[in-house]
Image (cartoon, grey):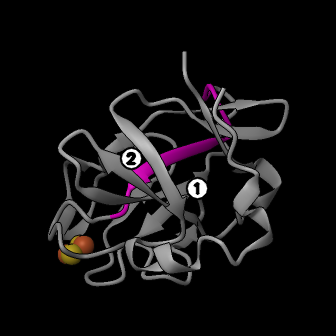
Amino acid sequence: MTRTRLTTVEDVPESGSFLFTVRERDGSEEEVILVRCDDADADDPVTAWRNFCQHETDQRLDRGFGAAVRAGEVVCPKHGSMFDTCTGYCDNGKAAESYLSGVDVAVDDGVVYLTDSTVEYSHDGGIDDEDDEDEGPSSTSHLTF
Ligand code: FES
């Protein structure tokens, strides 16, 4: 299985998100957020979701400065629907009865890996942040195994 190192669990904010960009099979780019999942029964302490609301899919959850995460839920900045960080499920507001679109990640020894074979890691940050790729100190840390 191919996996790409994304970051560490420690670097995923408790009340925010870690944003990165993937390339979908059709060649398009999509933003993905990593958020904490505190459910002891969950497989991993971090989950990944495509960065858009299910009510209006052009609405980003993380607009470049971290998604709002409160009490285990990602809050949509537009109408306030809340999505469970562990399951992606929303039972309230305009996006009620929907699930965020998930991306497979796995945690191994405190490190978060992208394991979803339907997407390819592109770069940290949002789609528009690609030019910054070579500037950050973490740019050399994304190893694919
Ligand atoms: S756009 Fe997210 S709840 Fe309406």
Q: Is residue 52 above or below residue 47?
A: below
Q: Is residue 112 above or below residue 125?
A: above
Ligand 1: give its quadrant: bottom left
Measuring from the top left, give residue 33's x and y in whole percent.
Answer: 49, 59
Q: Closer to the camera, 107 or 15?
A: 107
Q: Residue at x 40, y 79 (%)?
A: 128
Q: Is residue 54 above or below residue 129?
A: above
Q: Is residue 110 above or below residue 100?
A: above
Q: Amino acid at mark 2?
A: Gly
Residue bounds of the magenta highlight? 42-51
Mark 1 CB near ligand 1 (8 Å cut): no
Q: Earlier in the sequence, mark 2 or mark 1?
A: 1
Q: Quadrant of the N terminus?
A: top right
Q: Quadrant of the C terminus?
A: top right
Q: Residue at x 20, y 60 (%)?
A: 54
* Crowd band around label 1 with a 10 angstrom C-alpha radius: few (<14), some (14–19), many (20+): many
The residue carrying mark 2 is: 88
Per the image, label 1 sits on a secondary structure element best described as strand
Residue 68 magenta-highlighted:
no
Mark 2 CB near ligand 1 (8 Å cut): no
Whether pointer 2 and pointer 1 mark residues with C-beta atoms closer than 8 Å, the reply is no
Q: Residue at x 78, y 49 (%)?
A: 8
Q: Closer to the camera, 17 or 139?
A: 139
Instruction: Indicate which disc residue 104 carries.
Output: none
Per the image, label 2 sits on a secondary structure element best described as loop
Q: Amino acid at mark 1?
A: Val
The residue carrying mark 1 is: 35
Measuring from the top left, give residue 44's x and y in whole percent.
Answer: 65, 32
